[in-house]
Structure formats: C-alpha cells, structure tokens
Image (cartoon, rainbow, N blue to C red):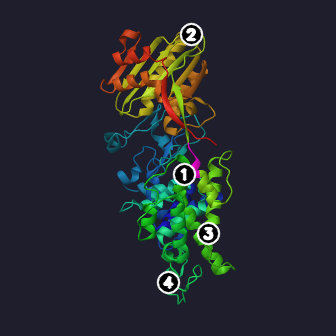
Amino acid sequence: MDLDLMVRAASAKLWWNFRTDHTLWSDFMRAKYCSRVHPVAKLVQNRDSHTWKRMLAVRDEVEGVLTWRLFQGRVNFWWDNWSGLGPLGRLYPHRRVSYSRELLLDYVRDGQLDLTDHDDLAYAGIRADLSRLGQGPRDIPLWTVASDGMFSYSSAKAFLRPALPTAPDPLLAKCWRKHLPFKVSFLAWRVFRGQLPTDDILARFGHAIVSRCRCCPSPVPESIDHIFYSGETARAVWRYVLASLGLYSRHRSLRTLIAGWGRAGARNPLLSFVVCRLPYLVLWELWKHRNGCMYGRDTPSVARVMHGVAKGVAECLFRRWPMQHILPSNWRTIVAYLEAHVPRRVIRSVRWFPPAAGALKINLSRSSAAGGAAALVRNQEGGFCYGVAWSGHGEHARGMFRVLFSCLEWCLAGGTTLIDIESTWAELASYVDISARPPWILDDVVTRLRFMCSCGVVTAAVCPSRANMPAQALADWAVDRPGEAIFRSLNDLPRRVRALLIHDDVPYVFFDIDDPP
C-alpha cells in the first residue's frame, strides 16, 4: 500500500509538471499524445507508454484540486478548472467539445464573463474571478490542497492516501518522539509492524533457514519476539531497567510491555522525559546487540546493551538541553541524577503593559466558539479609546482582520502613527512582516493589512492570554450578537469588559516550574 501510494504521488507530480510547465519533456508529451485533444479529455490507449498510463490514472484526482488564478485568461474554457467546479467539458458535454481550443479570454466582454452563447452555463451560475485580469504576465496554477497553493510531493501523498478502514495502531504513533534519533524511531516502528529481516519473517517467503539466535547463550530459533522480549538477554535488560527506575509492569508480550510503560507516572519532569524515550532506546540497543553477535565477533552481554542505552539517554538529554544536563554514559550515574533532580517552583506574574508615549495599543482576540472577534484600542494611561466586535458565519481569520482594520483606520484617521498590536494569534506577526509569504487564500486581506501598516510604525507581538482578557471577553460577548458593534466610550462596553479593563493593570500571579540545570 505504501509503495502504491508513492507511485501515485510521483505520477501526480508528473501530471502537475506536464500541465503547468513548458519544458522540453512536457512539449514532447503534448506533441505525442495531445496534438488534437486536450490532455484532460484524452482517453487512454493500449499502445500508450507505461508512464503516460500512470499519469492518466491520477489525472482526474489532480485536476479536481488544480485551479487557476486568472491574470491573462489564456486557459482552456472547457477543460481547465478556472471556475473551481472542475472541467466544464465533463459537466456540460456537447458535440466535439474534446477538440475545443476556446480560451476563457474569448468569453470576456468589458471585464465581465459573457455566457450568452451557452445558456446552460449561465443558468448554472458559473462564475470566474476576473479582478486580476491584465495584472500579470500569465495565469498561475494553484494546488488547492496546500495552504500556499504550491505543489509538493508530501501534500500529494497526503491527498492521495486512502482513508484508513480502522483506527491506527497507537503504538506506532508513540514511536516518533522529539529528540529521539530517527533511526531509533524507525526501528521501533518496524518492530511493531513485524517488518525486520529475522529468520521467522524470511521463512514466510519460502526460504529454508536453519534458525538460531546468536544473541542468547542457549540455541533457540530466532524471531522478533525472542530478540526484543522473550530471549534471555532481552528479559535481563528489561528487568534491570524496570528495577533500576522503580517501575513495575504486568506484561505478557512486547506490545503490552510498551503499552503500559510508565503508566504510573514519573516523579519529576526530567525523569518523565527519559522514561518516555527509554523503551525505544532499549529496542535499538537489542537490535545492535543481535547484529553484533551475528555478523561480528561480539558475545551475548547485558552490560554492553545497558552501556548503549545509557549513552542514548545521555545524548537525548543533550539534544533537549545542550547546556544543562551533560551526563556520562553510565546508567547508575544517570539514574542517581534523575532521582535527585527536583524542579524549582517559581512565582511569575502576567499583566497588560501600556504602550509608549504617543502610541496606541490594539488588543485583538477571537472567541473560543466559532464566529466571534473583537479588538480594543487603549492609550498610554490604559484608558479606553475605541472598540469593535464582530460575529458572523465564516472563517475566524477574516473576522479577526475585519475588526483589526476598523481599529487601524480609527487610529490612522486620528493622526496616530505609532501603533502596537497584541494578540494570542501567533500568525499575526508573519502577516505584518512584508518578507513573509502568507497563504494564497488570504492574499487580499494581508495586502490591505500591509498597506495600512506602511502608513505608520506598526508592530505586532504575541501576548499571554491573561494579558488579553478584556478583548477575549468582548469576543465571547459578540458570539450571540451577529453583526458589527462599535464602542466609542467606556460606558458602551459590556459590564464584564468594563470590569476587566479597570483591573487590567493588576498582575496575575501564578506558579510555574523552573527546571534547574
């Protein structure tokens, strides 16, 4: 299944390049297969090449998510997906439509789409975005599966991957941990899926093998379960690891051992970090031990496996905290350090800070429920100046931009050019930064935002949720009141928002855990 998915994704990439690029290869393929018929309308023939057949096998799926941003209108009227509905030649077929070379530009009159010659299309409400017509050198293809509109092999695989008929194995998802080497996670993934070149797996393919496990003193047949769980070396390693950390687990197989690993919880965050990654490091060292005994001159040794496990744990700690937890590859030393590690509890405070002299601050927030957004403008004394709330059906992001535009226009109209924007919305700073590339679906609103920011000195920052509570309360208030509400004085605001504004300068104190070196 995975190999078939990779082949289909590669075929989708070929079709994308064939449809969007003008290279020597794409021109050759068009001349060979599509000299008279449009590629989307081309039927497969027995004499076609294997590559062309693979491309046609994924053509309909790719064409469904390949749309065109119109700058010249030189796309095929019937077979290019310029309307977002797919090829019109399939939806509204007529005689000899497969050979049609009509362009969308032929149906544009005075900047509007004219479908008087095709009443069926006019009645169906076919529309096209012609607002950018004449503003660019060529029409741009968009891969609508990705947020940026750019084709990628990974997005093609995700798009073409079939839906799983059953729930995924939870153990496979746990293999992929941060700060754990990829080779370790990949081996654990192969162990749980039974995809290792051991004697029991090779015997399924009909190979006559005299099986003998080299990693244990007693001669027994080799299997995945024996190498990683039931063998003498594996059992000794698991018992030693569990006893040294004070962990206890009732298990009857490798899967039950890993599934119940560390379920009782760890005594401190550092120990929890190690316990979550420890079983996969043990699997990796047991596999190295098996290969060393089979192909090298190593002999069965529990101490060698534990030394490798200790080295792997020390390397994981170094990747996570490069300047703090630097430990030797000695298991007893590491265990003693983990047991003695006690995090320090510190007191932190969060509050709203006023802007600099002559500046205004806009606090922006969206509701936890769908459809609400709000923004508040305040001066350097913390006084309320202007507020707007909006609620309606649609995307959260566009509602946020709507209230933000209203506040920016009010500030610029009053002559204020120094504006600070605070929000828990992490993407806002990238939208203000002109060097960052926004998603293509937000091109219009981001362009307007950057133009308004160029009229003054505008900065955007991320703030804690506790420092943005008045705007959050106003956004929640707006959910049950569709439309836009503008507030020009403090008395116009809801009672809860007024109370939060008055006490917003009082810091919120909470306890946090500071991890000492």
Pointer 1 local density, CA inside 10 Å: few below 14, some 14–19, many at least 20: some
Q: Nearer the viewer, residue 103 or 19?
A: 19
Decide which of tag 1 and tag 4 comes sooner along the chain. 4
Residue 161: x and y in percent read: 45, 59
Judge left or right: residue 89 versus residue 228.
left
Q: CA distance from mark 1 to mark 3?
A: 20 Å
Residue 474 image position (x, y, % from top left):
38, 22
What residue is shown at x 67% (from left), y 59% (from top)? 329
Q: Is residue 341 found inside the magenta-colored segment of the image?
A: yes
Residue 442 in the image: above or below residue 350: below
Which amino acid is tagged 2?
Gly
Overall secondary structure of the magenta section: helix
- Labels 3 and 4: the sequence-earlier one: 4
Segment tinted magenta in the rendering: 338-342
Which one is nearer the viewer's eye here, 111 or 271? 271
**Relative to 63, does residue 360 appear above or below in the rendering?**
above
Quadrant including the C terminus: top right
- Give the residue at mark 1: 271
Q: Which residue is mark 2?
A: 415
Identify the residue under disc 3: 305
Image coordinates of residue 63 in percent, x first then y, are 46, 53
Image quadrant where residue 313 sits: bottom right
Residue 174, placed above or below residue 144: below
Residue at the disc numbered 4: 205
Of badges 1 and 4, nearer the viewer stands: 1
